[in-house]
Amino acid sequence: MTEPRTTDPDHFVYLLRCDDGTFYTGYTTDVERRVREHDEGAGAKYTRGRTPVELLHVEGFDSKSAAMSREYEIKDGSRAAKERVVAEGGVPEFVDLPVALLADDGR
């Protein structure tokens, strides 16, 4: 497993729960902006018809390569594996989003 960085990361992997209950995993350099884009229907094609979205989990990394590797690991996992990622992680305090975009179980 790719190890996340806990202080001052530049690259992020995030996991959203869509309105239909499905999960979406993505990569970004700006979590707040990207979650807002998804929620406004301007994000990935997958999330456009599944709004509103809730941010469940964020991991930070030093490099794009490390973050993209972790994104692939999560996307390749089963739903149960994604649920474990959410249960073991969450959203760090440095992610500044309105409460409406954060899942109750995300912090």
Image (cartoon, helix red, strand yellow):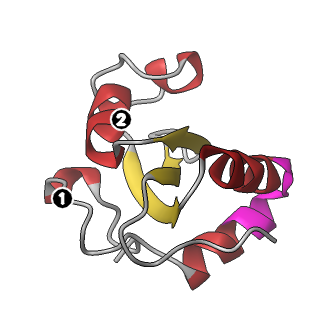
| Vertical comparison of 105 with 39: above or below | below
The one nearer the camera, 83 or 60, is 60
Which residue ends up furthest to the bottom in the rendered image?
A: 88
User: Split into 4 quadrants, where in the image is the C terminus?
Assistant: bottom left
Residue range of the region highlighted in magenta in the rendering: 76-82
Q: Is residue 52 visible?
A: no
- Image-based side of 54 in relation to 99, left or right: right
Under mark 1, the amino acid is: Asp
Q: Is residue 103 above or below residue 24?
A: below
Residue on which disc 1 sits: 96
Amino acid type at image mark 2: Arg
How crowded is the residue under tag 1: few (<14 C-alpha within 10 Å), some, or many (20+)?
few
Point out which mark residue 34 bears.
2
Q: Is residue 80 magenta?
A: yes
Pinpoint residue 45: horizontal percent, then vertical percent. 55, 16
Q: Residue at x 49, y 49 (%)?
A: 16
Tell me if 40 is positioned left or right of 106 in this view. left
* Residue 34 position in % (x across, y down): 36, 35
The residue positioned 65% from the left and 72% from the top of the image is: 85
| Tally of numbered discs | 2
Q: Residues within 10 Å of mark 2 (few under 14, many from 20)?
A: some
Report the residue at 38% width, 69% height from top: 91
